[in-house]
Image (cartoon, helix red, strand yellow):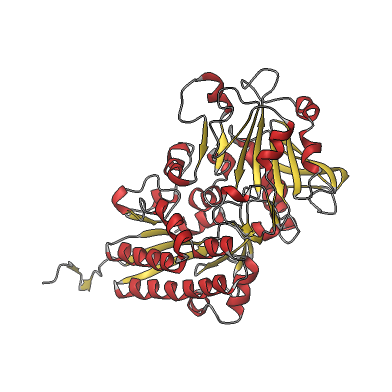
Amino acid sequence: MDLYVKTRGDLYSPPVKSLTLLIVLDGARYDLFCEFFAAGKLPHLKKEASTAEPLLGITTFPSTTGPAHLPMLTGCFPGRCNVPGIRWFNREVFSRKKVSFVKYRSYVGFGAFLIDVDLARDVPLIYDHFNRPFTVFASVNRGVPVKYRLGYFIRVYLTPYGRLTGEWLKTDERAAAYVVQAIKRGADFVHAVFPAVDELSHHSHPFSDKVKHAYENFDTLFGRILTEARREGYANVKFAVTSDHGLTHTHTHLDLDRLLEKSFEGVFYYPKTFRAWRNPKIINMISGNGMSHIYLRGSNGWNSPPSPTEIKSSGIVELLLEREEVDQVLVRSGRDRLTVFSREGCAEVGIKDGRIIYRRIQGDPFRLGKNVEASPEGILQETAWTEYPDAPFAAVQLLESSRCGDVLVTAKPGYDLRAAEFEIPEHLATHGSLHREHMHVPVVTNLDTGSRRVIRTAEIYNLLTSE
């Protein structure tokens, strides 16, 4: 039976089935991905890509799963989203309410389900642009019906399962099976996270044979997904494959919690939140193990942030910079300004009239070689290939969050900020900092990106939602 109306001798065709895919290969390093791409070890991705090599993507700060997914899902950054890390403290709520579920947060374990609640309500989400969006193992799901959140409830069990068995490739295979299931159920958008590269890197080495195999295995799964989509009649499939952060091998752990306990009373941190929870004087919230938000109680208690003078007199900057493991210490010096300290010197970072300012005071902590004042796009293009790509913008955007720390600390490559006893098995790779090995990520798409070869991951949002 012909269901389509003939008019003036023409036959109206059924609407073309379209599918948009946003796939995050969690923890994929830009350099290793490009090496495999060039060597033909990612044949399905290379065949479908619109460019001869992957775009250089610049992720956000902190370069950590969860916050680093927000730019591509919202077009906004963690500061604007008010999710400044995988752990944070809210001094405003803490000072006003004795009992509240939003005084502090960790998105590790069952807390992972709360990121949708904490995300700023006025932030748009990519799911809103589609009629039938699905997610697979996603950190952010707001606006997606629960029945379309595949793997939503089992994802909190995947980490202990993977750590006990080491079967992370099976988790990626499960993710691919869920994507195919979404396609068969008529999805017009699927956001999926493939965790094997990240988890295997954490528990071996970012360049281990297991990790390298995970890249190649992902390419096979990607090819299978596209084959199934076309078999289901999707004539128009557009995609972006990217990562949320890179990783560096970790040989030494700094126990930042205990370092602070030796110098300050009343230190509050995860997982030992029962310590000093009634009247903490300093709060440490580590993200990705390569950065941390530190909050200090000022002269007005927790009602307002401490002044720059109070932070300086606390001695915390000197305490941190004495440690070989610490790369940079960033201190709030105003509503839209930070002072950056390192062994390389100090500089001021800020935003004024929409322009990002990096002004060296002594030395050059971001190693840019000069003072810089430019638009956000100008900062990106000027710093993309430096040791700390996009660092002035990435750092200052966090100040938009009311949950941002008073002091931000990053770890050098090779080190992290969390005791091995809290990561079982021991973490052997780290991310979260401003260093290029954490900030550089690959972006592969079949869409036209013009002459651009360097983009922030936030631009993926517009790329996939534009007509």
Q: Is residue 275 among the parts visible in the rendering?
A: yes
Question: The N terminus appears in which quarter of the rendering?
Answer: bottom left
Q: Is residue 77 above or below residue 301?
A: below
Image coordinates for residue 338, horizontal then vertical, percent? 74, 37
Quadrant for the C terminus, please.
Answer: bottom left
In terms of depth relative to the viewer, which is nearer, 200 or 345? 200
Q: 33 or 462: nearer the eye?
A: 33
Q: Is residue 234 above or below residue 164?
A: below
Between 57 and 356, the one nearer to me in the picture: 57
Residue 404: which quarter of the image? top right
Q: Residue furthest top?
A: 300
Q: Residue furthest right?
A: 362
Place of residue 157 in the rendered image (x, y in percent of width and height, measured from the top left): 40, 53
Where on the picture, by quarter, is residue 311?
Answer: top right
Work out which residue is located at the far left of the displayed protein and give it: 1
- State whether residue 302 is above or below residue 243: above
Q: Residue at x 32, y 55 (%)?
A: 132
Q: Is residue 352 visible?
A: no
The residue drawn where x is 36% and y is 52% is 152
